[in-house]
Amino acid sequence: MIIALAGNQNSGKTTLFNQLTGSNQHVGNFPGVTVDVKEGISKSDKSVKLVDLPGIYSLSPYSGEEILARDFLLKEHPDGIINIIDGTSLERGLYLSMQLLQLNIPMVIAINMMDEVFANGIVIKTNILSDYLKVPIIPISANKNEGIDDLMKAMIDLIKNKCAPPRQDFCSGPVHRTLHATAHILEDHAQRASVPASFAAVKIIEGDEPMLNDLSLGKNEKDMIEHGIVEMENELSMDRMAAIADMRYQYIEEITQKAVVRPKTDKHHDKTIKIDNILTHKIFGIPIFLSIMFVIFWLTFAVVGSFLSDLLSGGIDSLASVVSKGLNNFGINPVVESLVVDGVFAGVGSVLSFVPTIIVLFFLLSLLEDSGYMARVAFIMDKLLRKIGLSGKSIVPMLIGFGCTVPAIMATRTLTSDRDKKMTVFLTPFMSCSAKLPIYSVFAMAFFTKYRAVVMIAMYVIGILLAIVAALISRKFVFKGNPIPFVMELPNYRLPTAKNTMLLLWEKTKDFITRAFTIIFIASIVIWFLNKFDIRFNAVENSKDSILALIGSFIAPIFIPLGFGNWMASTALITGFMAKEAVVSTFAVLLSTQTESISSQLGTIFDPISAFAFLLFTLLYTPCVAAIAAVKRELGTKSMFVVVLLQTSLAYVIALIFYRIAILF
Amino acid sequence: MKLIDYVIIAIVAAIVILVIWYLVKNRKKGCSSCGSCSACPYSGQCEDEKKDKKQENK
């Protein structure tokens, strides 16, 4: 039994999906969190498969999400549909419901966010709605797990009894006449294409190209239908699209007038508008956003996050000392002891100590996302992005890029224009992913202790500024043309929920820890081995004689003009290609030092100027191997090489310019 | 080298093999090294690729 969850963006489909399946899919107060089809098995009935569809406003094939949802509903033929509507904006939700009702699939309408409906003083008479739409209407609050059992029971009963919504007319007059005439003409074709004739008729009148192709109508039939539509347009003095939309809205107005009682003022929405007047202000919107980000970074890198990270690294060092002493007491071979202490503890521990910083950063960012502010960021940045040739929609992949470049690059699939997609993929690696955070932190601590937070924020800002410069240049020479317009619904502000925040935090933390114990662990062991033995596999006293020093010394001369022509620095850059956190773990292994003292040891390889040049290089040089694979998947091999070469060349040039100018002073 | 040294080396080697096996298994699943799928709003796309690959193999 397959049940599809369909509804508008940000109506709470994924929250309901998580409640029904026990999954922990990402939920956010941000339209378009789900951009693909997600499947899960119902907790209460293992024979029920639930499919979470992306948020859509209609079944017209305009955006990728709409095509995906529509294809699923029309071609996969689910046994039932749960149509989720945000109770605070019922009218908009019903616009989609009217189209879903024509699919001839058993359907239940779940009116979600009933807690907010009550809080706003809105009354929804579900029995009247049900009488009009002829499907069960179940009020729920997915967030609070209320009404979910009733919803599933109603859905399963309908499926078992094969109760599809009866065919109904939503209008009268010219539109009604044209719809019936069109449905009559194309009925045979619709049957062959396994599409309900009434649904096909509406889509054909709307000029839906994929539907026209699916039905394979003859020339005579097309002419007859066109003649009827033109007559309807003349009679109503409006075009076909407007006529269909008008028909739906008239019907919705009729229902809601009888079924919904609203207070004179919507307190929640009024509050949202008041806050928006400040946060999305024409002039102050961007400075406010930058100030909020500054406070977040300051709290993370200078106050809470750094304090907790220092505490944890102290703990890891103490544990390493205890293990080291224990191994010594057992008379363990010094090389084996070095493997455990300098390889495993130093390598993995150096990255692990940044878990608190990551937790604090993503905790604060999740508060912004869950409150609805991130949607406003996309809105206020749209104007700026358009000036540099990007669509406001590109902000979504770019924001994801601050977490990880891989899903950010995959997120560009939602961009409908090929030009916008390529440009966004090209610019996303400029955003500092969370894996670069340990590098910035260690170097800022070592060389810019007083200005630690400023340097860390500067790295993020420099990445964004260089992305803007790169966008302006590429717009002139490579990505000519204009970005597509960006339309997005701004959700009401909400208090972030503890569950969503904790879920996001857990996922980010789990991800970071998993990487530390997998990729970083392997990289640390390999680096330790190459650093501990020479080419005859004899243990070396001085790491200058090691295999790694030999490899590093081949590459090191390239970086002499940048001020860090040391074999250790070049080795760290190579391992950073596997995963950016590996830069820090490599230094920890190479310097055979404890987590807390990496910063002080780095002073033996770098001075403050070369350290900043190194930071600039790591900020900009080639993304990690997983991100490169994502670029290859999205744009092909040629573009992948272009991205790697361009990023690395740019990193080299910027670090070179900085170093050469800085040493003059 | 004593027996305990060999035991420690064997434990580290076993962990390395397990980690590599885990990474290869995830790679085959369609997950890249970006980590946990449930946190990713685009994980379904990896699943699609996995299905496509299975179909191609068939």
Image (spheres, helix red, strand yellow):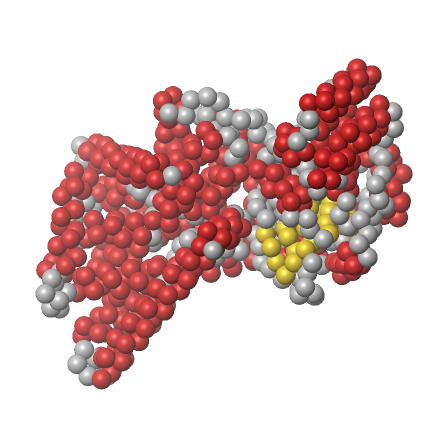
Which residue appears at 25% of the width and 75% of the height? B9
Against A262, residue A590 (above or below) is below
Quadrant where the C terminus of chain A lies? top left
Against A423, residue B35 (above or below) is below
Against A622, residue B56 (above or below) is below
Give the side of residue A321 with respect to residue A198, left or right: left
- Asked whether A363 or A536 is in front, the reply is A536
Q: Can residue A406 be seen in this view?
A: yes
Give the side of residue A344 with respect to residue B28, left or right: left
The percent coordinates of residue A595 (x first, y second) are: 30, 62
- Report the number of discs: 0
Which residue appears at 84% of the width and 23% of the height? A174
Against A566, residue A1 (above or below) is below
The percent coordinates of residue A371 (x first, y second) are: 61, 45
Q: Is residue A31 visible?
A: no
The percent coordinates of residue A494 (x first, y second) are: 66, 46
Quadrant where the N terminus of chain A lies? bottom right
- Asked whether A377 or A319 is in front, the reply is A377
- Asked whether A374 or A92 is in front, the reply is A92
Which residue appears at 76% of the width and 53% of the height? A140
Give the side of residue A421 with respect to residue A175, left or right: left
Find residue A648 and report its image quarter. Answer: top left
The percent coordinates of residue A66 (x first, y second) are: 62, 38
Give the side of residue A412 with respect to residue A95, left or right: left
Which residue appears at 36% of the width and 22% of the height? A477
